[in-house]
Amino acid sequence: MKILRASLIVAFALAACGEESKPPAKPAAEAKGAAPAAAAVDTRTPVEKSAESGDAKAQVALGDAYATGTGYDKNAEKAIAWYEKAAAQGEPDAMRALSRLYASGDLLDKDPAKAFEWLRRAADKGGGPDDELMVGVMLRNGMGVGKDGEKAAEWFRKAAAHGNIEAQYYLGVMHGQGDGLPKDVALAVEWHQKAAMQGHRSSQFSLSWYYGEGEGVAKDEVLAYVWANLAAATGSEAAVKRRDALEVVLSPEQKNEAQRLSSNWKKGTLPRRLSAEAAAKLPAVEEPAPKASAKGGDKAASKGPGAPSLPTVKLKPPPENAPSPNDLAGPKGTK
């Protein structure tokens, strides 16, 4: 019995040691070769990823989306936050956006001073000639900043050097009227010529006045007629009236030359007169039937021959608070 009892104790001991030495059982899923749990999915859009990584252009795009509610719920705080992040990196588009919000009072309390400051920063950062133009307009009109004609002219010159025809027009007006700049009619004519040859109808009208009066340039009623006719072709009622008034003082030969110069004008050029001998040899231009005036309908006919068929010139609308080309009759404000 003692021997049997000892054998049983040894057997149980060996069995216990065997159980302890076995490795722990694997979960059923792992044992069958199942894949581990998937990582969390990144639901951010590409724009969001770029913006959060510091891309200034993406930050502006995200600001625009939140400001307008395009693709996102409209959120003023997020829009402004993204614009400010981009502006802190020197992005002019963000600065312009903040200027617009402060000027309009949309999403932010209206603040003309901050609107001006953000726009000036955008222009300083190379925002472009439109920003330079508008900084000049705000300085000239005292919008969010004290009126300063000299500083306005500096910004207009920058914009004009970049080809902005509105800035060229403003410089023509300021020099012609001595408004914020010393009066210099010859220089006014030069600036108006730059804008007029690009299709700016207010400058075209102003040149008609200068040539008709002989101020800043030799008096030339043919060129006065040509510039009035070109402005009339863009829809200026004041130009139509001026052209019709000039028509009665031209000789048949002068009128013939003026019509041909108008018809042959091309954007980017100045009309050039022929010598008297060459002009006299030109064949006569057939006059179209008189047109009904804009105000008189069928009862009143236009006195002049009507503007020639000219290339369509798409003009940008004048800046805020700028004189309307339709209302501007000339450097002295006559209508």
Image (spheres, rainbow, N blue to C red):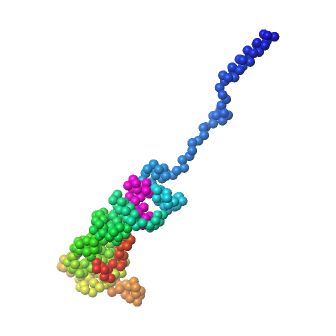
Residue, x 43% and y 54% (percent of image)? 85
Is residue 95 shown to the viewer in this render?
Answer: yes
Which region of the structure is painted magenta? 83-103
Image coords of residue 51 (percent x, y): 46, 52
Residue at 66% in and 35% down? 29
Q: From the viewer's perspective, is 197 left or right of 14?
A: left
Q: Main secondary structure of the magenta part?
A: helix
Is residue 268 in sight in this rendering?
A: no
Q: Closer to the camera, 31 or 185?
A: 185
The image quarter containing residue 142 is: bottom left
In this rendering, the answer to whether 174 lies above or below 251 is above
Tell which of 204 and 290 is nearer to you. Answer: 204
Q: Quadrant of residue 258?
A: bottom left
Q: Quadrant of the N terminus?
A: top right
- Is residue 94 shown in magenta? yes
Where residue 299 sits in the image (x, y, percent)? 40, 89
Q: Magenta stretch: residue 175 in it?
A: no
Residue 126 x, y percent position in the rendering: 34, 58
Q: Quadrant of the C terminus?
A: bottom left
Image spot of residue 192 (x, y percent): 27, 72
Front residue of 78 and 211: 78
Residue in the image at 23% along x and 74% along y: 183
In depth, the one of 151 and 196 nearer the eye is 151
Callout count: 0
Q: Which image quadrant is residue 117 in?
A: bottom left
The residue sitting at 31% across, 84% down in the picture is 244
Q: Would you say 151 lies left or right of 84 here?
A: left
Task: Work out which residue is located at the far right of the displayed protein and give it.
Answer: 1
